Image (cartoon, rainbow, N blue to C red):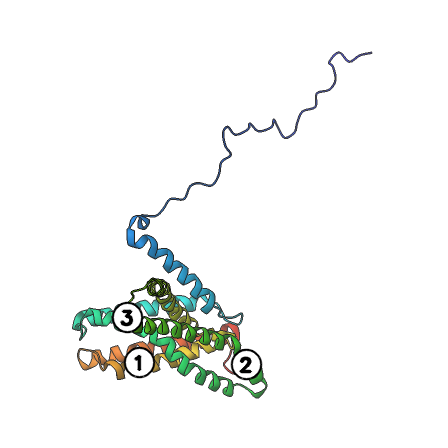
Amino acid sequence: MTDPYGPPQVTDPYGPPPTPYPGPPPGPAPRRRRLWWRVPFVGWLVPVLRSANRAAEKVFKHQGEGRIVDPVVDRVQLTRSLLGLLATLGIAYAYGPEDGWNEAAENSVGNLLVTPVLLIVTGPLVMLAFIFYAPPHRRRVLRSRLGVPLKTIGWYLLTVIALGGSIWAGSLAAQSGGYQGALDIAIALAMIAVLLWGLPFLFFASAHAARSAFNTAHVHAALPAVLTGVLVWVLALFNLIDQGMPNGPVQVQLCSLLGGPLTVTAVSLWELRRMRTRHGVTIRG
């Protein structure tokens, strides 16, 4: 006997197949160039700066697994830096820089470049004192971790020597009669390309090296805070010897001279205390 309703209908539980997309398959949306790409000079400068910054981060920003990432400390440090910058600008606006704003800007950039150099000079002494202050059974472990900071210092010195040598060689070639032959012109263009990328690289390298204290967190988590507290007083002494007292009344001069070192030292001590109370990290631990 046959079934009057025919064979049972099997329905697809997933529904009908999707309708094919008409035309070529959709791809990623085209990237829109930003407004600065239309500016002739900035259009090629921004990629150069980005490339130099990425290279500087790769070489100089390895703060180590022992570094304690504390967002509260980062916010306090950023707030102190912004308040210090506003106070410096306020004092400079009220009393005026002695040699003009161009000289003040040059001094600010010079401080950024001098800070890693002072770190190279004072850093090893502070690290040796830090290791000597540690308990005897910890000294060998701390000494075994010095490779990354010393390598970072070596890369920074190599960068300074390479750029300084390029500038020196270029000045000698220009003084000896200029660039006349095809080879001399090619060398000159190569040196210009090196300087256009190398100077931003040195700038970003100085910023990252100063921020991470040459990756000394590889040795001990508390060492960057200790180094920062020592370095700020060395830098203040260097500025006092090099530039003298700032303009303004005596009270303003003392605030301008001692305000930065005192606040940075206070933040460093607070950071060390927070490491001890929140994370159990001590200088001798």
Return the mark for residue 174: 3
Observer-nearest of 222 and 173: 173
Q: Nearer the viewer, mark 2 or mark 3?
A: 3
Q: Up-down: is 167 above or below 128?
A: above
Q: Position of residue 276 (x, y in %)?
A: 49, 76
Q: Residue at x 45, y 73 (%)?
A: 155
Q: Residues under labels 1 and 2: Cα distance?
A: 29 Å
The numbered dot on residue 158 is none
Residue on which disc 2 sits: 142
Amino acid type, mark 2: Leu
Measuring from the top left, give residue 107's x and y in whole percent: 26, 73
Image coords of residue 268 (percent x, y): 40, 76
SS class, disc 1: helix
Q: Disc 3 residue type?
A: Ala
**Between tags 3 and 1, which lies in front?**
3
Q: Helix or strand or loop: what does disc 3 sit on?
A: helix
As displayed, is residue 162 above or below residue 121? above
Would you call the spot at circle 1 few (<14 residues within 10 Å), some (14-19), or many (20 or more)? some
Q: CA distance from mark 3 to mark 1?
A: 38 Å
Comparing 96 with 202, the one in front is 202
- Give the x, y percent position of residue 152: 47, 74
Find residue 176 and report its image quarter: bottom left
Amino acid carrying label 1: it is Ala
